[in-house]
Amino acid sequence: MSTTAATPAIETFSLTKVYGHDNTEVVAMKDVSLRVNRGEVVALVGPSGAGKSTLLTAVGLINPPTAGRIVIGGQPVMEADRAFVDLRAFRRKHLGFVFQKANLIPFLTTVENVQLAMEINDASSRAARSRAPELLDYLGVADRADHLPDALSGGEQQRVAVARALANEPSLILADEPTAALDGTRGRQVMELFRKVAHERGAGAIVVTHDHRALDVFDQIYEMEDGRLSPSQLNKPNQQPERSVV
Amino acid sequence: MNLATKDIRHNLGRFVLTTIGIGLLLMIVMGMGGIYKGLIHEATLLVNTVGADLWVVQGSTRGPFAELSRISANLEDRVRAVPGVASARRFVSYTVQREVRGRKLRLVVTGLAWPEDRGDWIPLVAGRPLRQAHYEMIADRSLGLALGERVKLGKEVYEVVGLTKGLVGGGGDGLGFFTASDAAAIQFDVPAEATRLERAARQARLAVSDLGRVQPLLRNRAGGPASGLPALARPQVSAVLVRLQPGANTSVALATIATWPDVSVYTTHQQIDMLIAGMVDKARRQLGLFRVLLIIISTIIMALIIYTLTLDKIHDIAMLKLIGARNGVIVGLILQQALLMGALGYGLAYWIGTFAFPQFPRRVVIEMPDLLLLAGVVLAISVLSSLLGIWKAMSVEPNKVLS
């Protein structure tokens, strides 16, 4: 599969998020427009409190914006805090999440964590049992399939979390500092994994990161500061965003 | 994939301990119902077993099981004359507490109308019914007496010739069957000096009465045993038991006897109702209230446990919501755990009860309708107790994962 496809995995138009009212008002995100194509992996960098996580949760449909529009896979999903779809069902079918902590269900084995995500999306138990080990194998943790999350290293847990995020072949993967708890080598492995997954499976990926050592694996890098999004100076000449940000 | 069982497996120790606690509570609830049913069973056992259609008792009283009832023993002759009556026999019942072999013996003395009633209807587990007019008794095993054992009651010694099992009175004391005259002898046993004084007083009363003047020969009898003075003696039996002829109209016989001003008459059904209303009603209400309290306590404990288990999983529940799990998956996780806890607790309660209840001093009767009712209650409290946890789970936002 090509590294970028023409179809946008997600587009946002002038997303704004304001917390509080009057004197307590805080603008966490201001007029953020972004386009990530299928097969494209995008990094979001910036200082703490810049609004990266706010953007990620907004496009992850768990923290509605105050204003702006979100289109995922060509389908309008939200306009301000008005949803056009059943958000939970949409997340289930089209989005994959990875966080700083793997957030695996502690009472399920590795393979069951992946299976569960499939079954939640109406896959039959038999199909889920058959596909989950394949995904773990793809991410190199097949030998840990029957272990509980506690028995896995941080890197292995993150791989399982990625496997779970991929379980329903999402069109968009959202990752919030997925390597923060990992050492440099393992952190880079996970970042490369996102690139591999995005390129090979045709999913768009937005990764919030502070880890500048692995930025070379991304197709595009954006910076957020004071709630505003802009292309990063860290982009290499060939890492130019297709769409300018406002 | 069943998340509830997976979670239980992961927190097995806590789940097992909680279930044991719930099970013990439910066992007490089950036992309370059983004790109440046991009270009714024991209270009505004799009335049901003795095989009478009508009970003739002292006028304006509610019978020997509710209060003191004394009627003349020869009333049975009058009853036999009532149309439709097949047989009538005297019946004596009262509780005594004596000392046998250095320990307290509390028994319900039950007098049978010798020779018509030899106790052939009594369900024996060993020995035989009464075969002589005096000095034999049939004892319940709960009294701790052995077959062939000789027991001194009053001035006489009685040999245990038959044994019953589980035949107790309303107070839970074992029944002892004697002939009616032996029962009266035990009941009215008084010190010799008291007997002499009573006989002398009786002779003195007779001497100044018209009867004594008309029939001076009675003076000798007045100085003898009271049982030899049918006209002058005190009432000697508690009730007269009436058996009707097959096909006889109960209400007609009842109405006939009810016209006699000196007695009251009840059907066996009425006698049982009076027993339950009089002896067991307060116990029933007390046990019922206690059961309700225990059920409320069980519900609160289960709710707290389920709520705590839910709180422990709140991050996982937020994650489930984030990845798009339907509410049904999350509700199912909590509800199934509550139901499983309730069901296992119920099973445990029943299992422990089968060993524990027979060791209770009073009979505990567990009947299927009560078991089904309690199962329904457990189902209801399981659902009720999960509501708090479900409410908490439903209110958590998926972005809680990020915190």
Image: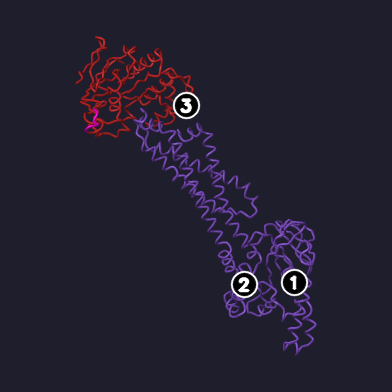
Chain colours: A red, B purple
Does A139 sit above or below residue B299?
above
Q: Do discs 1 and 3 belong to a common subunit?
A: no
Q: Do discs 1 and 2 belong to a common subunit?
A: yes
> Identity of the amino acid at label 3?
Thr
> Front-most of B31 and B285?
B285
Residue hosting label 2? B54
Span colored in magenta: A22-26
The reply to whether callout 3 and callout 2 are in contact (CB within 8 Å) is: no
In the rendered image, residue B19 lying in the magenta stretch gets the answer no
Residue hosting label 3? A109
Chain containing the residue with disc 1: B
Instruction: List x then y, in percent, for residue B166.
Output: 67, 57
Please rate how many residues cluster around mark 1, counting C-alpha atoms within 10 Å: few if below 14, some from 14 to 19, many from 20.
many
> Front-most of B343 and B208?
B208
Look at the image and tell me in which quarter the C terminus of chain B lies.
top left
Nearer to us: label 1 or label 2: 1
Say how many tags the image has.
3
Residue hosting label 1? B181
Mark-to-mark CA distance, 1 and 2: 22 Å
Q: Is mark 3 on a helix, strand or loop?
A: loop
> Identity of the amino acid at label 2?
Leu
> Front-most of A12 and B292?
B292
Magenta stretch mostly in which secondary structure? helix
